[in-house]
Image (cartoon, grey):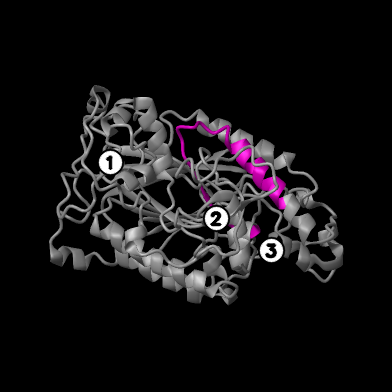
Amino acid sequence: VENRKKIAGVDSSESITSVVDDEEALALKLSRALMKGSHTPRNFTGCSSDIDMKYQVGYDNMPSPTSTLCFPEARNNPSYNYDFADEGDFIGTCKFIEFERPQMSTQQKEHGGINLIEEVHSKERSSCLIDSNNTGSRPSNCCGGLEPHFPFHSFVICADTQLGVTSQNVEWETEIEYAKKAIQTINSLDPPPLFVCVCGDLVDMQYSFEENKGYSSRFKNKQECDEVQAKQNLDFQNVFSELNPEIPLVCTCGNHDVSNRPTPASIQRYKDFFGDEYLSFWANGTYNIVLNSVLFANPSGAPQLFSNQLRWLEHQLEYAHKHDAKMIFVYGHHPWFLYDENEDTDDLTGLSPFPKEWGKSTFLEDENKPTGFKDSYFAVPKKYRMTALNLFRKYGVNAAFTGHFHQNVISKSSWGMEHIITSSLSVVFDSSGKPKQEEENGRGLRLVEVHLDKATCVASMTKVERSSKKNEVRRGGTINHHFIPID
């Protein structure tokens, strides 16, 4: 129990009740707990980087690897253990602490009885019914709940902040300004979103892209590229520290963070700056799974890590189903598909012209290179896509949120899963192969509103009903979403 208190960020010398009674402390701890990674052991050690980590706080102080409250201290630890964690190691928000519930404060009772601790190991869950009379703005401390406490909540999707892409890494103040506009918009939302997820390509610089340019690259070597990437990573952390601290930040990695062919080394470099590259968490009765989709796009450089993540993914989906998640959402960088779940490379004939901001750059001087990005570059290859989609179908995933395409595309799978590609906070593309979209294309973010039903999603169904619903999304609620331009 004492060890689990420590993991939860509770001082063993304090009574849990006294912590919970302090509403401000509870809000902070829940923000931290929401973003706890759920596959990485917390006891690794390593040497700190020489880079000035003034924007970061180490793992030893807070348990939150991807929140603005706690980016991990940069580490260089080649002996880090990548092995898949056993079930007993899932101490993140997918398994809350196994000790007695604390007493609630008067304020918490007034807000519907929100607890820091959620017990998930009981054979039967307590009632999942939502108080439909509780329609006011949520208190700041309702995130991270296995049980739904409110009939409505929201979250924000951003994608491709990609610091440096406009100038091809000569400067990145341009993208910082775009990010600041997005953050100002998010901070002004009322009620505030439960969390913000940036779906990959946090920064633009990644050595493998410059290596592929060969002589046309303006950067001399890998060391120089890594130094630029480190500066961009720190500036990303700095600018997102302006996000309302009550709104946790989830970061997913993109190909410009870990390369088009990620390796254990490139993934570890990302983790040194941003924490776990895949994780899961509860939010108001919904289960949220964050993936390293770059491994699905090309697992050849890290096949064991791909296998580990795939096993972990199925484990998480089974877990969410077992505990009757109202809805299941999946987040990543790469779209699982662009327009149709059965599309193949040969079907994707569209082209997204290079952005006008690039002008006549050195990247475009080679006349033998294409004048744009083929649609086939953006989607997960079919053989890996179907592996994931079959799992999503089996467990009734409600929606998948991605970026990478730098343009808005909304589609739906055959079993009803919404597939939502959100445009970027940097350069914007416009594919010639894209069907007409209802949303405008541009630079911006997406607000997702989740409306939960009163009835429990699965527990209220008979075994026959459950088996008949394997090719449908979970019936615990609905979502509405819309794109908010920042220009």
Image position of 113 with respect to 420: above or below: above
Q: Residue at x 20, y 67 (%)?
A: 468
Pointers 2 and 3 in contact (CB under 8 A)? no
Q: Which residue is mark 2?
A: 436
Q: Residue at x 63, y 67 (%)?
A: 377
Alpha-carbon neighbours of circle 3 within 10 Å: few (<14), some, or many (≥20)?
some
Alpha-carbon neighbours of circle 1 within 10 Å: few (<14), some, or many (≥20)?
many
**Nearer the camera: disc 2 or disc 3:** 3
The amino acid type found where label 3 is placed reads Phe
In depth, the one of 340 and 115 nearer the eye is 115
Name the spot of residue 38 as percent of width and height, x first.
41, 55
Which quarter of the figure has residue 178?
A: top right
| Marks 1 and 2, the one that precedes in the sequence | 1
The amino acid type found where label 2 is placed reads Lys
The amino acid type found where label 1 is placed reads Ile
For the residues labelled 1 and 3, the Cα–Cα distance comes to: 48 Å
For the residues labelled 1 and 2, the Cα–Cα distance comes to: 47 Å
Magenta region: which residues? 229-256
